[in-house]
Amino acid sequence: MNQTVLKVSLVAFAFFVSFNTIVAQSDGNNAITTAAPFLNINPDSRAAGMADAGVATSPDMNSQFLNPAKYAFMEEEMGVSVSFTPWLRKLVNDINMSTATFYYRLDKMQTVSASLRYFSMGTIEFTDGIGTPLYSGKPNEFAIDAAYSRVLSDKFSGAVAFRYIRSDLTNGYSETGDLQAGNAFAADMAFYFKQPMKVNRNDAEFTAGINISNIGSKISYDGINKEYIPTNLKLGAGYAMELDKYNSISFALDINKLLVPSNQIRPDDAGENWVDPNEGKSVPAAIFGSFNDAPGGFQQEMQEVTFSLGAEYWYDKQFAIRAGYFHEHENQGNRKFASAGFGLKFNMFTLDASYIIPMVQNNPLANTMRFSLSFDLSDMR
């Protein structure tokens, strides 16, 4: 890889990797990196208020991002939502992610949905190997999704989603002509389960969900080297109950693991060149091998799992308060933060917002806010 390509990749990618590694500078740091990591940024403000716990929470208009199978049990017939996330504001002031989501119920059994995620990396100055300015550009990445969800029983639903991904790290610029935007295709497979019950004569519900996302092709920026996209496994459970006529509360727990090879880049036998033993591994082999490929064995595999614990309180189904805690092992990025959020529902629209409170020093995610505005369009059918 020439110097310009290397510099572009490092500069653009650092915005993402930094929040995994800047607070994890120990010798044991082994954080996993992938191409197009924006795919694992959750834009849903409701889930963000619960520390990104959302694969098993009640259905909402942004279910597309964490578990599209939940759409099958949406009470509203049609809706649209837009979200905005200023990203890594502690480092730079012009990185943002904007999303739009739409869903439509075909009948009592089937629902379709679509979404667009657009990630702007702000303005970047590209230089050659000795630091001479070459070009000023605005790299960006986006993903277009379409999903189909279906009720499989009165308690169980499933969904599949298909995704086109484009990652343009140079905004079309290439000094030598060998650099290009990366393209990939991926799919998600998701399921959702709910079990209504009674607790002290009040309605309650246990829920569970699973979403395997970004199962797809590798991505290349030069037509030669290929990188994995962030194939991801998300499992979760939830419990919700009505306290009385006006008050309800719910709890959610998610566990998350990247289904890509563990970081094993190391010097070769001569101790000179850096080699990656997983470079030629196929996507299916990487997914299944991701459960037992860590150099540190089972202990390191468990370190690669993150946890999200969240709670949500609703008053009269009009005002919500949320809180959560996210935990990641220090050797995998050390993202540890609390979250807070709120929701307001007025007739046909809902406003959600969330805020990150870091639990470690020098966290680039500090003070990150997310906003979502959703509209119930059922009356337009």
Image (cartoon, helix red, strand yellow):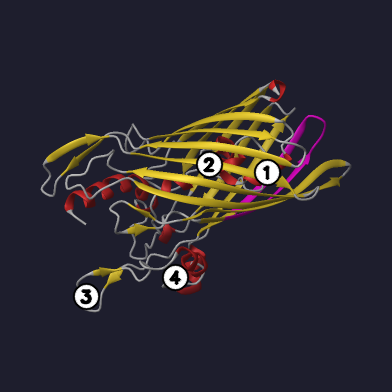
- Asked if one can make out residue 53 in the rendered structure from this viewpoint, the answer is no
Residue for badge 2: 145
Task: State if disc 3 and disc 4 touch (CB < 8 Å).
Answer: no
Q: Which residues are magenta?
A: 234-254
Q: Is residue 251 magenta?
A: yes
Q: Nearer the viewer, residue 76 or 370?
A: 76
- Asked if one can make out residue 369 in the rendered structure from this viewpoint, the answer is yes
Is disc 2 placed on a helix, strand or loop?
strand
Image quadrant where one finds the C terminus = top right
Task: State if disc 2 and disc 3 touch (CB < 8 Å).
Answer: no
Going from N to C along the chain, the mark reached first, 2 or 4, is 2
For the residue marked with disc 3, what is the amino acid?
A: Gly
In percent of width and height, residue 336 lies at 47, 50
For the residue marked with disc 2, what is the amino acid?
A: Asp
In percent of width and height, residue 95 lies at 36, 35
Judged by its main secondary structure, the magenta piece is strand
- For marks 1 and 3, give the CA distance: 51 Å
- For marks 1 and 4, give the CA distance: 33 Å
Residue for badge 3: 271
Q: Nearer the viewer, residue 222 or 139?
A: 222
